[in-house]
Amino acid sequence: MTEFIVLPGIGGSGNSHWQTFWQQANPAMRRFEPANWEAPDFKNWLAALELAVATAQAPPLLIAHSLSCLLVAHWQKVSRLPVKGAFLAAVPDPSSPVFPTNAEDFATAPRERFRFPSLIVASTNDPYGSLDYAKARAVQWGCQLHVAGALGHINGAGNLGAWPDGRALLEDFATACP
C-alpha cells in the first residue's frame, strides 16, 4: 500500500479543500507539519518535509498544492531520501503580481529535472500561475503535464469538493510510479 504525504500551500488547505477531503478518506495519507501555515518559513517547511519523508514506512508519494510545489522542487535537490513520486497541483509563478511576499524564499525554485516521477496538474485560468508557466516548469523538471481545464487555483475556493477527477489522476499516477 502506498503511503502519501499531503503538502498544502499557504493556509494549510482548509475544510473545503480537496487535499483535506482526500486525507479524511484515506488513512494512508498524512499531512506534513510545518510550524506555521500562514507565514511560511522556508527552512522550517523544508525540515518538516524532510521529517515527514524520513518517518515514512516506505518511499511515499507527495501530494503538493501551490507553494508546496515549489517546496518539493527545492527539497528534491537537497535531500536524498527516496520518494515514489510527486503529484503537483497549481504550481505558482513567483513572478506573478499575486505571489505572496511572505513566500519569497521559495521563489527561486531549482530548474533541474526531478529525481523521481512527477505530474503537474494545471488549470487554464489559475491567477497564481499561468498555463505557460506550468508548461515551462514541466519541461524543466521533467514532469508529465495534465491540463485540467478552467479550475482556478485548484483549491477550496473553486468548489471542487473532493475533486474526483483529480483523485482519478492521482490513482493513475500512483499506479504508474515504480
Image (cartoon, rainbow, N blue to C red):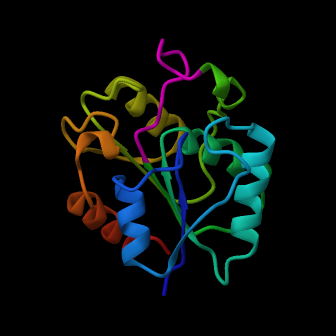
Q: Quadrant of residue 94?
A: top right
Q: On the picture, is 134 further left or further right than 45?
A: left
Picture coordinates of residue 142, whole percent (x, y) = 50, 45
* x then y, percent, for residue 140: 53, 35
- Farthest residue in the front direction? 15
Asked whether 93 falls inside the magenta stretch, the response is yes
In the rendering, at what x and y percent does residue 103 appear? 65, 28
Answer with left or right where residue 154 lies relative to residue 80: left
Residue 126 position, x and y percent, is 32, 29
Residue in front for this viewpoint, 125 or 172:
125
Nearest the viewer among 59 and 139 is 59
Residue at 48%, 88% in the rendered image: 1
Q: Is residue 144 above or below residue 38?
A: below
Q: Residue at the spot x=39%, y=56% of the render?
A: 15
Q: Quadrant of residue 83?
A: bottom right
Q: Which residue is at the far top?
A: 97
Residue 53 is covered by the magenta coloring = no
* Magenta stretch secondary structure, dominant: loop
Q: Is residue 28 visible?
A: yes
What residue is shown at x 46% (from left), y 70% (from top)?
A: 177
Q: Is residue 49 left or right of residue 145?
A: right
Residue 81 visible in the displayed image: no
Q: Nearer the viewer, residue 164 or 23?
A: 23
Magenta range: 89-100
Q: Quadrant of residue 58?
A: bottom right
Picture layout, residue 115 above or below residue 146: below
